[in-house]
Amino acid sequence: MLPERYPAAPALDVEDVTVVLGDRTVLWDIDAVVPRRTLCAVVGPNGAGKTTFIRAVIGLLQPISGRIRIMGESFAQACRHVAYVPQRSGLDWDFPATVLDVATMGTYTSLPWWRQLGNEQRRRAKAALETVGLSDLASRSIGELSGGQQQRVLLARALAQEPELFLLDEPFQGVDAASEASILATLTSLRDSGRTVIVVHHDLHTVAERFDRAILLNVRKIADGPVSECMTESNLRRTFGARVGFDERNTDPRSMATDA
Amino acid sequence: MPDFAVIAGCALAGILYGLLGSFSLARNQALLGDVLSHAAWPGLVLMLGLTGSRNFAILGIGACLAGMAGMAILDLLGRGSNRLKPDARLALVLSGFFAVGMLLARPVQSIRPGSQGHLQAFLFGQTAALVWSDVMVIALVLALSLVFAASRWRDLTALCFDPVWRQTTPASNMATSPLLDTILVLGIVAGLPVAGVALVSALLVCLPVTARVLTKRFLPGTGLAMLLGGLLGASAPWMVMGLESLAQHFHGDSTLRLPTGPVFVLAGSICAAGALAFRYLARSRAKATGAINHAAN
């Protein structure tokens, strides 16, 4: 179910976006395009505005200028086709729910409030758990999961939404190697089946090896495009080295808080 | 034999607080109820001063308006770049509103002679004086809450577990969060005749805490909190009667009168403590068995 109103539009098109939080400029004049059917990493040091970038894309933050289009539409129009996977550390894992409950939550988004949860929703939730390899733990309390398993539950919830565009915020933070490999494999197969996946990430190794494209951010956009073209030594130095034209105070408090 | 209105009022309030408290606890807002009951206080005092009415339906309107104002200020303090931490916000609104209420209480008592006892009853609750019109208010709010919770259950679950994610879904168009806040204010105000400003929110915490410890999913947990609230509420007047007759038996003192609200709250707190102790014992036992198995291997 593609939003075929603009079939030729890229999955994400960001133009001249500036975000200010309080009196700090967190993102300055960002332009970036992510074509469909790609696996794209958003890369940058802590406080570079990566989380802010994702939050602006999904409408949680209002840019003071610029335009964001998702498959040619505004986020409000396209939100049915977008799934956001938040940072696992921002959630209350004591919430009384099972693994299957959280995966089922993903099907809520396409179900009007007056309709009952049906077999279709249950099937989708179970299929999503199967994909991330958590079927055996379906009836386990989420409070008993490891970090990697928690991240996979959140990915399963996104899968159950059956979106065209996935946005993941630091999905590999505090995750064991096996879960990281499994999540990466899932994301790759999503790309192969025609979806677009955007991941905030900071391990440059996996980006170079496994991702198609990258957006290099440090308050300003340093570069974006295919990994082979934009992950050059000079671009990386500009991203992670001296903070180009901005001082240390230009950090995103949200990403600082959740990175800890 | 306790008055039937008292039994019905306590039972319905228990069910109501089991339901509303489950949402508050799940949203990590267990203290919000306490803040709202204190925020409602100046509205109630002012309404009594303005109208001179003793009718709870009329005083309740003032209490609700003040409660909503408290909620709005809480929200306002959380915005902007110099936003306060949640605990500071809660403390500010609670104490600020309560101070206004206490300040107003004096002049109101002098313009409306004889209102002192009435105000005291709302401050500390006077369950034994519950009348059917009070019970009807509680029943009405309970019915409203049940319809709301049943029709918006899925969205409420998402709101409690992951409000940020929910904001990115089409559900963000539904006004579930402000509706829940409004119903919480109504519920708190409706319960004032039962337990008073000081204690009403205790029920909002102890019932769902007990249920949370004993269940692992949200729907059964909420159901259990409601059931427990209903049972404790219905039995609280009987407990009071039992305690009073015990006192008479041992001391020969037949004039002793115990307040029902605090007994209700205490029974709920004992349940919560019992459930927590049960979980602690179960866990340490599981740990010990695990250690033994580990050693055996």
Image (tube, rainbow, N blue to C red):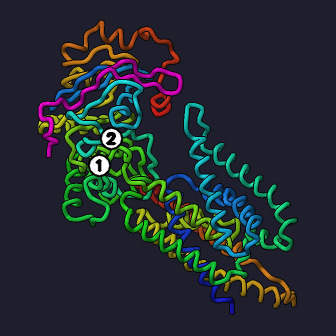
- Pinpoint residue A22: horizontal percent, then vertical percent: 53, 27
Q: Which residues are magenta?
A: A1-30
Residue A26 drawn in magenta? yes
What is the three-letter code of the residue carrying label 1? Arg
Label 2 packing within 10 angstroms: few (<14), some (14-19), many (20+): many
Q: Is residue A46 left or right of residue B14?
A: left
Residue B139 drawn in magenta? no
Q: Answer yes or no: do the residues labelled 1 and 2 have beta carbons within 8 Å?
A: yes
Q: Residue at x 32, y 13 (%)?
A: A222
Q: Above or below — where is B89 with respect to A215?
A: below
Pick whichever, A217 or B175, lies toward us: B175
Residue A218 shows in this picture: no
- In this view, the residue farthest toward the front is B51
Q: Residue at x 85, y 60 (%)?
A: B107
- Residue that label 2 marks: A85
Pick whichever, B193 or B287, lies toward us: B193
- Pinpoint residue A133: horizontal percent, then vertical percent: 23, 48
Q: Above or below — where is A157 with respect to A252?
A: below
Subunit under mark 2:
A
Pick whichever, B204 or B177, lies toward us: B177
Q: Are marks 1 and 2 on the same chain?
A: yes
- Residue that label 1 marks: A157
Quadrant assignment, res B8: bottom right
Quadrant assignment, res A170: top left
